[in-house]
Image: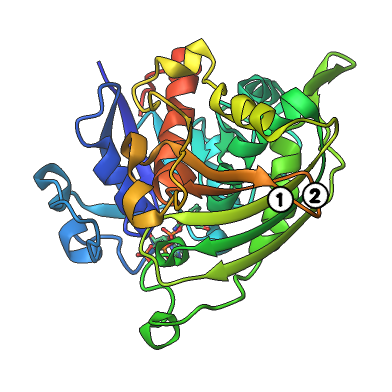
Amino acid sequence: MKLRVGILGATGAVGQKFIRLLEGHPWFEVTALAASERSAGKSYRDAAHWIESTPLPASIAEMEVQLCEPGLACDLVFSGLDSSVAGPVEKAFAKAGYPVISNAKNHRMDEDVPLLIPEVNPEHLALIERQETPGFIVTNPNCATVGLTMALKPLQDAFGIEAVQVTTMQALSGAGYPGVASLDAVANVIPFIGGEEDKLETEPLRLLAPLSREDGQPVVRALDIPISAQCNRVPVLEGHLECVSVKLGSSSSIDGVQKALAAFESPDEVASLPTAPSRCLLVLEEEAAPQPRRDVDRGAGMTVSVGRVRSCPVFDVRFVVLSHNTVRGAAGGAILNAELLAARGLLAHRDV
Ligand code: NAP
């Protein structure tokens, strides 16, 4: 029997991506949709302005949208809630016994909450042991953090990292719906995304840190590596592109760096999950790759593409990273997290 899934923030951009990606999922079935009081009581068709490029699934269209309150008939919830409300709502669900798999920033840096990319730090799931609620919260990182961290992981493992500089060009869908006003976005670049640079400068340091045990308790202490981030909103629909320069801990040829990136593979327990792509990190050889329009859907949006790997006259190496912000950077990443939890036996049918 499939696990029953509720979606908090079901009407938003990320909520819609959950609905699309969960259609026909082999392990999960959507049984509850919740959003704000503006939407509660309406059919999903009436409450949501559907922006996905595939039709709204018929099984979802007539479901009633509920309030984001415990009592939803499901075994786990995905959260695509606005960060202005996600913190206490997600806690309330965890207190009521639900596993909460969240996209929101609110609990990402809590010391007992895993901030998870299954291919990078699956061992961090042990932090759940420290949560004192009957349910628990697991988070996925900011949409721009995912691509950067996936590319840094093999370099950290092979050479160590001493400093990172990253400049992002981020898609409009990252701002949700209706997001950035068209008169600001069209034929323009906005060199500011509120709160984004701080997330890029901190979240990778937690994701790349080892898990240790102190007095028997699992602990993650963030690495101490300077990351300088500059974030820009560009008129692209889907896909965050990032230009990255890295100072390595030990010297390497560019060939060595390319080989380390190309050799990066999912751990076996992750590679076999339904949403895992065949390659989680793909090095592209073409001189003008990756590009959002051409490469964002690689691996059904779950593959992170890297290109233009070359030496850097200031640091050691530079390259370009592309990741799908609403798939790998949001709903798809959260579904992969839930699949890892299910594979480890951490999700169960509940009597609700
Ligand atoms: P969005 O399109 O603005 O959707 C926000 C959702 O939150 C809607 O379903 C909305 O419901 C609900 N909501 C707002 N106020 C609420 C309240 N008081 N009570 C209950 N529900 C409420 O935003 P989004 O882009 O989907 O982002 C959702 C979350 O994911 C955010 O925390 C964001 O930072 C994070 N995230 C987004 C991306 C991305 O690429 N877009 C990537 C990673 C993470 P109503 O429709 O009823 O107002």
* Residue bearing the label numbered 1: 245
At 37% across and 83% down in the image, what residue appears?
A: 182
Density class for disc 1 (Cα within 10 Å; few <14, some 14-19, many ≥20) is many
**Does residue 338 lie above or below 308 as drawn?**
above
Q: Nearer the viewer, residue 86 or 341?
A: 341
- CB at mark 2 closer than 8 A to ligand 1? no
Crowding near pointer 2: few (<14 within 10 Å), some, many (20+)?
Answer: some
Q: Which residue is the extreme one toward the left? A: 58
Q: Position of residue 42 (x, y in %)?
A: 21, 62
Residue 344 in view here: no
Q: Farthest residue toward the bottom?
A: 183
Query: Which one is nearer the viewer's eye here, 1 or 229?
Result: 229
- Farthest residue, direction right: 215
Q: Amino acid at mark 1?
A: Ser
Mark 1 to mark 2 CA distance (whole Å) = 6 Å
**Amino acid type, residue under disc 2 in the picture:** Phe
Is the C-beta separation of discs 1 and 2 under 8 Å? yes
- Which x, y percent locates residue 54? 16, 51
Query: Is residue 256 visible to us here?
Result: yes
103 left or right of 254? left
Could you say which disc has been placed on residue 315 in the image? 2
